[in-house]
Image (spheres, rainbow, N blue to C red):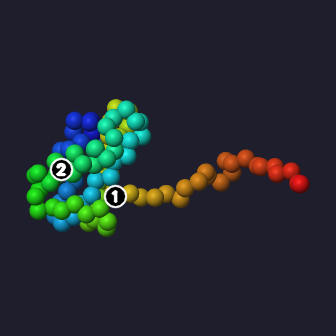
Amino acid sequence: ECSFQEIPQTALSLTEEEKTFRVSAQRLVKTYKPSQQINEEIGAFILERKPKLKVKLKYPELELFIDILKETAFIYKERRYGLGGLPAGTSGEVFVPPK
């Protein structure tokens, strides 16, 4: 978790010995910069400081995810998917009348 001003440096700190990378920003609140602009700015910042890295949009070794919230941002490099859906017993019943 970081502030908007800390996004470039935090993203840079997550890079290690990879050869290729990609930045994938997602704005949950649409008051900040467009996602594509965030991707380009953070990618350029990383490339200036680590010129041996290459941008690769398909199958990169490292994918940096940036989620923009109202007043903060989350930056991470690994997604873990849960089971999804509602817990058992929390959904109601649906009645469909016969034709």
Q: Please state which amino acid type lies under the numbered disc 1.
A: Glu
Instruction: Give the image location of residue 97, x and y in percent.
Output: 86, 51
- Describe residue 83's horizontal placement relative to residue 89 as left or right: left
Horizontally, residue 78 falls left or right of residue 21, namely right
Which quadrant holds the N terminus? top left
Q: Residue at x 40, y 36 (%)?
A: 30
Where is the C terminus found, in terms of image quarters?
bottom right
Determine whether, in the image, residue 47 is placed left or right of residue 24: left
**Circle 2 Cα neighbour tier, 10 Å, few/some/many (<14 / 14–19 / ≥20):** some
Q: Which secondary structure lies at badge 2?
A: helix
Q: Is residue 11 visible?
A: no
Residue 77, percent from left and from top:
30, 56
- The residue singled out by tag 1 in the image is 78
Where residue 9 sits, quadrant-wise, is top left
Of 40 and 5, which appears nearest the observer?
40
Viewer can see residue 61? yes
Q: Amino acid at mark 2?
A: Ala
Q: Residue at x 38, y 57 (%)?
A: 79
Q: Are marks 2 and 1 in contact (CB under 8 Å)?
A: no
Q: Which residue is mark 2?
A: 44
Please state which of residues 40 and 24 is positioned toward the viewer in this rendering.
40
Q: Nearer the viewer, residue 43 or 1?
A: 43
